[in-house]
Amino acid sequence: MRSDPAGPVPGTAGDPRESSLAVKILVAGGFGVGKTTLVGAVSEIRPLRTEAMLTEKSIGVDDTAMVSGKTTTTVAMDFGRITLPTGLVLYLFGTPGQDRFWFMWDELAQGALGAVVLVDTRRLADCFASVDYFERRGLPFIVAVNHFEGAKLYAPEQIRAALDLDDDVPVITTDVRTRESAKQVLITLVEHVLMATARRG
């Protein structure tokens, strides 16, 4: 067998990351809010995407008014992986945004450590279902406001009040197109989960 000078294949027994702690993270939010972009921005592997083209059948169903350039939509999930400097490996699962795909959420949420709810302030109501879902399940989550061109800026406390969030839920701003900004979202979530675990302990 030919030896590979590049080292072991990620995810195989020879991969040093196999000895690291790995956890599952969900990335949720409304249609077109940037979930696929976030996963793609931070993933150290080529992301797995299950996207389909928007067709005439989506007219009147998928609101593209604020995302007129969007031509595809996630129909199952996005999947990526990132290893944090601490050695913690995050497996990222981007959820589909439209309510007709919500039947998949229970399956995706199995075993998840926490979640990121992405928000577009121009369509704030689109994230209500995600917030409600994670609150009902008792799954720790943070809210990350993805800044879109032309969107009005709001203070985190204004977002917290509008979403009726508990005081301990972090609300941060981000630009998920930027790797470092998207990475900070995940670090904030991990820190929040650790703090929530410590409070329960």
Image: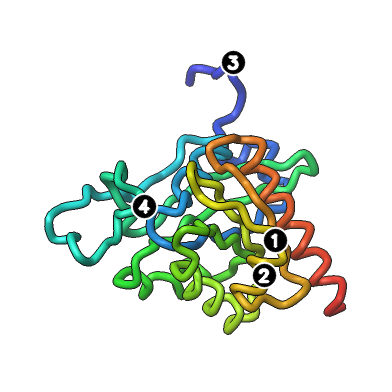
Residue depicted at 56% across the width and 73% down the height: 131
Image coords of residue 94 (percent x, y): 47, 55
Residues at circles 2 and 1 in contact by the CB criterion of under 8 Å: yes
Instruction: Give the spatial CA distance, label 4 vs label 3.
Output: 48 Å
Mark 2 and mark 4 lie on one chain; the one further toward the N terminus is: 4
Q: Mark 3 — residue? A: 5
Q: Amino acid at mark 4?
A: Met
Q: Amino acid at mark 2?
A: Arg
Image coords of residue 87 (percent x, y): 76, 43
Residue toward you, 154 or 16: 154
Residue toward you, 65 or 189: 65
Q: Mark 4 — residue? A: 66
Instruction: Give the spatial CA distance, label 2 vs label 1.
Output: 6 Å
Q: Would you call the spot at circle 4 few (<14 residues within 10 Å), some (14-19), or many (20 or more)?
A: some
Q: Is residue 180 left or right of residue 4?
A: right
Mark 2 and mark 3 lie on one chain; the one further toward the N terminus is: 3
Q: Is residue 113 visible?
A: no
